[in-house]
Amino acid sequence: MHKQQKPPGFSRRSFIKTVGVSATVSTLSGIAEAHAAAREQERADAVQGPGPIAVAFTVNGKAAEVRVEPSVTLAEVLRLNLGLTGTKIICDRGSCGGCSVIVNGKLMNACMTLAFDVQGATITTVEGIAQGGKLDPVQESFLRHDGLQCGYCTPGFVVATRVLLNDVPKPTLDQIKKALGGNICRCGTYTNIFNAALEASGQAPIMDQKGV
Ligand code: FES
Ligand code: FES
């Protein structure tokens, strides 16, 4: 004789088991929801913008703090927020070097750098090259050699030359040409610019007016 099968359905034991599992599941889902909410909050706290955000750095030895949208470039902040108009925006696309600045000792195009990306950096613009009211030897040399015509590219060249001489105190002419290769002078004063760079590094100018 076959043992009588229990009809399917809920026994007291299975009911208690089910309630227990449901309670566990609902507790776990509550924890998961709490984690998700915390992650969402963290994300919301970490996300900055699209409205203005605080950006702070040191410019020419002074602390500066501005509130700008994350899409604003360093060149715009320097010129429009801090009034440092020596940094020129010419091509606004990283191809002329007119906006050259020094960021943590490195030459950078300020038009291609978001202000937000240099948070906390030490920045020197052409206004910060002269020290104690005395022109830097690079600036003196540009004046002496007439390394400019309209002068629009000049701040960028001065900054780029300063960075070169910081790294290589006595560069060869080839090194000078290479280092200043990212700067464009539409007036074509390259000969005088290269001579100025040579003299600023304590070397005799060797290029004549034909640029040999
Ligand atoms: S303005 Fe920045 S590289 Fe030309
Ligand atoms: S001096 Fe005019 S662009 Fe260089």
Image: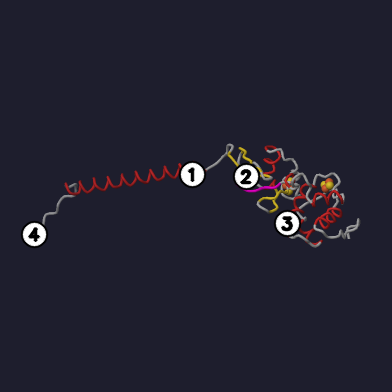
33 on left or right of 190: left
Q: Earlier in the sequence, mark 3 or mark 4?
A: 4
Residue 169 placement: quadrant = bottom right
Which residue is the site of mark 2?
57
Q: Around disc 3, counting alpha carbons within 10 Å, would you say few (fewer than 14), some (14 to 19), or many (20 or more)? A: few
Image mark for residue 43: 1
In this view of the protein, which residue sits in the foreground, 35 or 108? Answer: 108
45 on left or right of 93: left
Q: Answer whether residue 123 is magenta in the image.
A: yes
Q: Position of residue 118 (x, y in %)?
A: 62, 47
Q: Answer whether residue 2 is magenta in the image.
A: no
Which residue is the site of mark 4?
1
Q: Nearer the viewer, mark 1 or mark 3?
A: 3
Residue at disc 1, secondary structure: helix
Between the residue at mark 4 and the residue at mark 2, the CA separation in whole angstroms equals 91 Å
In this view of the protein, which residue sits in the foreground, 53 or 92? Answer: 53
Asked if the residue at tag 1 contacts the one at tag 2, i.e. Cβ–Cβ closer than 8 Å, the answer is: no
Which residue is the site of mark 3?
166
Residue 89 placement: quadrant = top right
- Residue 212 versus residue 52 in the image, above or below: below
Q: Nearer the viewer, mark 1 or mark 4?
A: 1
In this view of the protein, which residue sits in the foreground, 207 or 72? Answer: 207
Give the amino acid at mark 2: Phe
Between the residue at mark 1 and the residue at mark 4, the CA separation in whole angstroms equals 67 Å
Magenta residue span: 119-124
Residue at disc 3, secondary structure: helix
Q: At x 67% / y 37%, what residue is drawn? A: 81
Residue at disc 2, secondary structure: strand
Between the residue at mark 1 and the residue at mark 3, the CA separation in whole angstroms equals 42 Å
Give the amino acid at mark 1: Arg
Asked if the residue at tag 3 contacts the one at tag 1, i.e. Cβ–Cβ closer than 8 Å, the answer is: no
